[in-house]
Amino acid sequence: MFPVVLAVTLATTDAGVGGEPGLRLRAVGDVMLGTSVPEGKLPPDDGATLLDGVKALLQDADVTFANFEGPLCDSGTSAKCKKGGNCFAFRTPTAYAKYLEAAGIDVGSTANNHSGDFGEACRRETEKALDGAHIAWSGPPGTVAKLTVKGKKLALIAFHTSSACNDVNDLSAAKKLVASAKAEADLVIVSFHGGAEGTNATRVKDGIERYLGENRGDLKAFTHGVIDAGADLVIGHGPHVVRAMEIYKGHLIAYSLGNFATYGRFDLSGSLGYTVMLEITLAADGTLVSGKLISTKQEGKGVPVPDDASRGAKLIRDLTALDFPKTGVRFDADFGFTAR
């Protein structure tokens, strides 16, 4: 067990029910601010200005979440890097943690298929870097990020389809971990990295999804199961494209938020470059009050900026109508929504 605790004092949001303020959260998908392996894949200004175009959006929340797609470390080798072959492994400098903190990210997931690219020592270096930047994290088995926000205890549990992390494919253990967290916290958020990848992976399917022979999770069973166990919100990422959004028993499930800031190593053509920032307000009992989608895109090699054409939000709206005609989120003209 690797418990992580971070106390936070943030501004009050007026939305809520019964006269109580709600918790206003913003969440984004995959974040990888460049990699030192291979050489030449780090952003200009050594990453200092990479998030400037979206910083105000990230900071405008009580709590902001991101998935850290790859480790923050400064040394080590990767088993993925074979001599003379293509090395698709990430290693972002630990100094970049301060850019995540400055951008307003409060809590994140280290549970994904790139978190172990440079081994266990690099995982520990990542955790140390995030601790130093006052960013709470969850990822390895048993880990729960714990924050105190506006007097409320908030727990975030991050999952991936691997036994090296809290495991999407071990639903029994996942439900026990969520129930245990709920016994101590006012609100529990679950993050998961799962599903197939790429432009053909926008649809949420019934049953197990597979990618390159790997079991990438039965995502409907997982998301419904953790809500049954006490989760108040479920945030997905992993397919590198956005996916539909569903309301289950009064709680929101966002099946994928896409690529938010993935510099230098990702295909960002077409839908792979469109994403959203999800904003939601939760009532004191954890149910959905309201929310909205804020579209962003990545320009050039992966510089995130607002997308006035709202392509990410439009895609989520259309996919939601296809995949969840009865239980999907109902969006207004500005991509806002409320509880069904």
Image (spheres, helix red, strand yellow):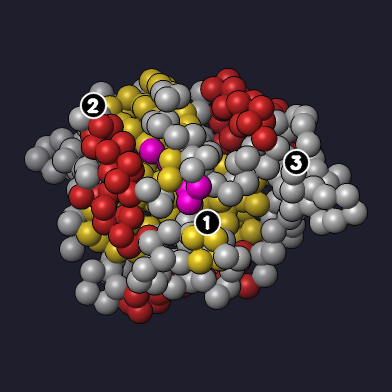
Residue at position x 57%, y 42% in the image: 68
What kind of element bears circle 3?
loop
Q: Check whether the beta carbons of the residues at disc 1 and disc 2 lie within 8 A of each other.
A: no
- Residue 250: which disc? none
Residue 280 at x, y percent in the picture: 32, 49
- Residue 78: which disc? 3
What kind of element bears circle 1?
loop
Q: Check whether the beta carbons of the residues at disc 2 and disc 3 lie within 8 A of each other.
A: no
- How busy is the neighbourhood of tag 3: few (under 14 within 10 Å), some, or many (20 plus)? some
- Please indicate, yes or no, whether residue 242 appears anywhere in the rendered image: no
- Residue that badge 2 annotates: 184
- How busy is the neighbourhood of tag 1: few (under 14 within 10 Å), some, or many (20 plus)? many
Considering depth in this image, is 19 or 126 the residue closer to the camera?
A: 126
- Residue that badge 1 annotates: 238
Q: Amino acid at mark 1?
A: Gly
Residue at position x 38%, y 61% in the image: 218
Q: Nearer the viewer, mark 3 or mark 1?
A: 3
Considering depth in this image, is 135 or 58 the residue closer to the camera?
A: 135
- Please indicate, yes or no, whether residue 206 appears anywhere in the rendered image: yes
Magenta region includes residue 288: no
- How busy is the neighbourhood of tag 2: few (under 14 within 10 Å), some, or many (20 plus)? few
Q: Amino acid at mark 2?
A: Glu
Considering depth in this image, is 335 or 214 the residue closer to the camera?
A: 214
Cα separation, mark 2 vs mark 3, equals: 38 Å
Cα separation, mark 1 vs mark 2, equals: 29 Å
Residue at position x 69%, y 55% in the image: 302
Residue 27 at x, y percent in the picture: 44, 47
Q: In the rendered structure, which disc, 2 or 3, sits on the residue that comes first in sequence? A: 3
Residue 6 at x, y percent in the picture: 42, 22
Considering depth in this image, is 87 or 108 the residue closer to the camera?
A: 87
In the rendered structure, which segment of residues is drawn in magenta?
Answer: 157-162
